[in-house]
Structure formats: structure tokens, C-alpha cells
Image (cartoon, grey):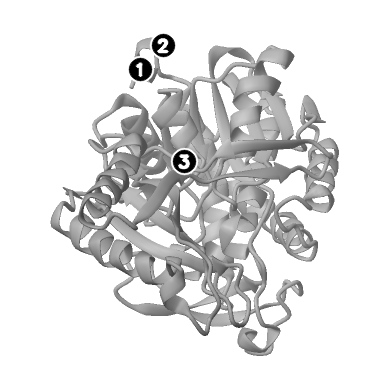
Amino acid sequence: METIQETITKLAEELKPALVDFCQRLIRVPALSGAEKGVADLYLAEMEKLGYDRYFRDKWGNVIGIIEGTEPGPAIMYNAHLDHVDTGDYSEWGGYDPYGAEIDVNEMENQDRDGYEQAEVIHGRAAADVKGGGACQIYSGKIMIELRKLGYPIKGRYIFTGVVLEEPAEQLGMIKLIEDTFPEEGIDYDGVVSCEATSLKLYLGHRGRVELQVTVSGTTSHGSAPWLGVNAVNKATKLIDRVEESIAAQRRTDEHLGNSSIALTIINCTPGSMCIVPDRCHITYDRRFVPGETFKGCVEEIQKIIDGLTEEDPEFRAAVEIATVPRTTYTGLTVAVPNVKQAWKISPEHPFAKAAAAGLSSIGQPVKYGYWDFGTDLSVICGREKKPAIGYSPMQEFYCHRPVDKVRIDYMVKALAGNVAIYQELTALEQKDFIL
């Protein structure tokens, strides 16, 4: 009889055509944030076709699929998100239709980003973020079903989740999945594998993020007599310079995640009319922070700068707050969540990460580690819920959110097997091994 590792690898090759077809069908359906229904429907239909034991949509629009093992064991959540960013200008796509899911051979970055190689790829928006990985997680579930039919022992519970509204960064879909849906449905989980882009490496963390909104106040006057007013934009320039200087001077560094940072991303003023001095200047900052810093501390940094400027200039008035924008799901529910992601990192020596590495080694895949530049919904899992998680997927960060969005098919087949091999090792862990 074949070893389970040999069977996993063989099934991954056999499922390649169906996997590629499903990924193409996902890419052909637009799924902007708040409009993910079409893709959610595709995921549910595919899970039904493949024989998942349970599959359903929650009231927030998230989709959940469950495959039961043959023996008791931990429950591992494999997570994707349903939404994607806008395509941007079609003329930037080099002749490819962002929703065409065309297949051809392209020059692609290698796994270590130190060279290029030719590979067969699927083009299209969200191929790299995260439809390529979502397709793999669904079909890794199919391998689990086949292993069960063949009589191999399967421990625990395989849970697939596809969440809404990840791209806006408030993590609404994941938060409501964990806070509402799982308790209501009696579902628990012990750890998570995310399919955000990792180039088949095991990703172990990322910086935190908080979106800060600063409003600088002035007083309107006629544009012909600016001395009668207080120009909020002119006052804001003082704040902008001071923020850049202060954050740069106090910047903290993590050996794996890099530097903390701040970026001014949006600025506008009101009333914004001809012949009137603006009385409000609205500034949005994207603040990234490393472990050891907190989002509350990031707010306090800006407030300290505001306080200092107020002491220097009696006409200076400003306020800072965390951005909280109402979001509406495609199911019609509206809620506002503060735009915060906690920084998190898991050690490669943690039992969860070591088990994932052992899974990849068992099927002959090299074990390499990385950390995301961007943020993910794993902030909810590791940062807030204090449960272990790693990232593993076929997509490459370099191609995310860009008009060169694509995913390597050879990496997809490897990820198909890799997900299952990781699951086999994770479900062999004891409960104590899931403590962060």
C-alpha cells in the first residue's frame, strides 16, 4: 500500500485540471469588497460538488465548509478571503483581461526572489490575492475526502472559511466569523493556515496597522482677506512636518518584520470652494507598528505632537482618532469596526510552526520562512484570539494588487499537496501545543 504522503502527491497531480478550472472560474467573477456574492456562491457550489460534509453561508456572507476526520483531533481552519481590490486602468494590464483568467507561460520570480524562471500561470485580478490559494484550500479538502474513502486515518476536523471585506482592512468578516458565527454554530478551531501569498514558504507574522484620522481646524474667511481667517491647511503643514520627524526619530525595528512606519495617504480640506479659506484639513495616516508597540500608543504619539503644537501656537487646533468606517456586507448588514490590525509573530520553534514544517518535509517540499510586508486577517487569530497560525500558499507577494496579477500553476499543485501534509502534522499535535 502507498504511504499517505505518496497518495497525497498523486491525488494532487490528478486533481490539477479541476483545480485550475475552478481557479479560472473564481477569477472570472468580480468580487469587490461588499459585492462578493458571486464568488461565495461558487465556493459553496464547489464544496457541494466535492462532497464536503457541511457547507453554509453565514449572515455576514462568509462561507464555511467542514470535513470530518475519522478520529478525534484538533480542528484546523484553512482561511481565504472572498474580496479583491479594484482592477485599476485596464490599459495597464498588458493586453490581459483582468477577469479573463487566461493561461500562458510567463517569466516569473522564483521562490527566493533572486531570479526569474518560465512558468505556466493564470492571469487575472485576485489570482495572487487570494483566489489561487482559495482554490487550493478547497481542493485540498477534496484530497482529505479521498483519503478518508481510501481508509487512511484522518484526525480532527478540516474547516475552510472564506471571509468577506478583508481588503478594507477592518477585518470585519473574520471578526464576525469568530465572534458570532462559530459560537452560534457550535464550531471551534485550534489553529489557522492562511492562504495569503507566501511563495510556498511558511509565513510567520507581520506588522500591525492602525489608520489614523487627524482633523486640523481653522476659521473660514474670504479668499481676498485671508488674514481674517485661520487657514487649516497652512496649520496642517506644521503637523505633517512634525509627524514625519517624530516618527522617524522614534522608529522601532523588529529583526524579522522590519521597521515601524507612517505614511500620509489621504489629505483634503473643506469647504474646498473658490474664494474661501478652508476651516478644516482632514489627514489620514497609515501607521505600521512592530511587536512591542500598540495601536493605542500610536494614537498617543500623534496626540503628543498636537499638544506640543498647541502650546507653541494658540491658533493651532487638531484632533486625532482611529478611523471607523461603516461597511455593508453583500447580505445587507452594516457595521463599523475600528481600522486596527495587531502586530503578531510566531516562532519557527513553536510546535505549530514546527509541525507545518514537518508536513512540508514529509512530501519533499523545502522548508523556508518569511514574513508579510502587508497585513492579514491573522491579526485577529494571533493578535487578539491568541491562537497559533501560519501562512502557506502558492501565490507570490510581488504580484498582489498589481496589473501583473497572476499565479503559478506548478506552485498551485504543490500547495494542494502541501496543505494536506501540513494538516496531517498539525492534527497530530496535543492540545498544549496550540498555546501561543
Using the image as rendered, state which of residue 344 and residue 228 is in the foreground.
228
Q: Position of residue 363 (x, y in %)?
A: 43, 44
Question: What residue lies at 46% left-to-right and 23% top-to-bottom?
Answer: 385
Residue 9 vertical position relative to residue 223 in the rendered view, above or below: above
Give the residue pinned by disc 2: 431
Residue 387, image x, y percentages = 43, 24
**Taking 271 as reference, is 237 left or right?**
left
Determine the CA span between mark 2 and mark 1: 8 Å
Residue 103 visible to the viewer: yes
Question: What residue would you read off at disc 1?
Answer: 435
Where 436 falls versus 291 (above or below)? Answer: above
Q: Is residue 3 visible?
A: no
Amino acid type for the residue under numbered disc 2: Gln
Amino acid on which the number 3 mark rests in the picture: Val
Question: Of discs 3 and 1, which sits in the foreground?
Answer: 3
Q: Quadrant of the N terminus?
A: top right
Q: Residues within 10 Å of mark 2 (few under 14, many from 20)?
A: few
- SS category of the residue bearing label 3: strand
In the image: residue 214, left or right of residue 409: left
Quick one: SS at disc 2? helix
In terms of image quadrants, where is residue 13?
bottom right
**The C terminus lies in which quarter of the figure?**
top left
The residue under the point 39% across, 35% down is 356
Q: Is residue 348 above or below residue 257?
A: above
Residue placed at 51% from the left, 60% from the top? 395
Specify few, some or many for label 3: CA neighbours under 10 Å numbering under 14, 14-19, or 20 or more: many
User: x, y percentage for residue 284?
Assistant: 46, 58
* Residue that numbered label 3 is attached to: 340
